[in-house]
Amino acid sequence: MNKARRKMPVSERAKQFMPFAALKGFSEALLEKEKVIVPEKELSEDMYAELDRNYHRLEIGKRAEVVYYKEYEYLKVSGIVSRIDENARILQIVNTKIPLDDIIDISV
């Protein structure tokens, strides 16, 4: 009456628990669509002078907070300054490398 069932191979068993996405890439497309494109601000002479003063107060090993422009958005990073490279025009806070030309605000 009750026939013996064959065991399902392990490789087939794993497939039944895999997530199913009917619209592959749809969630990534929605996230991309949610981004608001922000134009880059032009710094005034006063803002540029204050930025320059704060830049020259930076010291390796000291804490700083930097706001910079990257890929149509403004990002804020804070932490220990690990590198200031004027030749490569890069400021590094912990592991984040920031081009000097993209910085709009520095707090020391």
Image: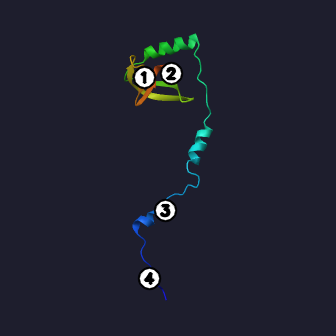
Q: What whole-number distance in Å separates the C-alpha atoms at marks 1 and 4?
A: 69 Å
Count of number-bearing discs: 4
Q: What whole-number distance in Å separates the C-alpha atoms at marks 2 and 1?
A: 9 Å
Q: Which residue is mark 4?
A: 4
Q: Position of residue 37 (x, y in %)?
A: 61, 31
Q: Nearer the viewer, mark 2 or mark 4?
A: 4
Q: What whole-number distance in Å separates the C-alpha atoms at marks 4 and 3?
A: 24 Å
Q: Is residue 99 visible?
A: yes
* Earlier residue among tags 1 and 3: 3
Q: Which residue is mark 1?
A: 91
Q: Is residue 108 visible?
A: no
Q: As displayed, is residue 2 above or below residue 26?
A: below
Query: Circle 1 — which element?
Result: strand
Q: Nearer the viewer, mark 1 or mark 3?
A: 3
Amino acid type at image mark 3: Phe
Residue at x 48% of width, y 12% of height? 53
* Earlier residue among tags 1 and 4: 4
| Residue contact at pointers 4 and 3, CB within 8 angstroms | no
Q: Which residue is mark 3?
A: 17
| Residue contact at pointers 2 and 1, CB within 8 angstroms | yes
Residue at x 46% of width, y 16% of height? 55
* Earlier residue among tags 4 and 3: 4
Q: What whole-number distance in Å separates the C-alpha atoms at marks 1 and 3?
A: 46 Å
Amino acid type at image mark 4: Ala
Residue at x 48% of width, y 25% of height? 65
| Residue contact at pointers 1 and 3, CB within 8 angstroms | no
Q: Position of residue 106 (x, y in %)?
A: 50, 20
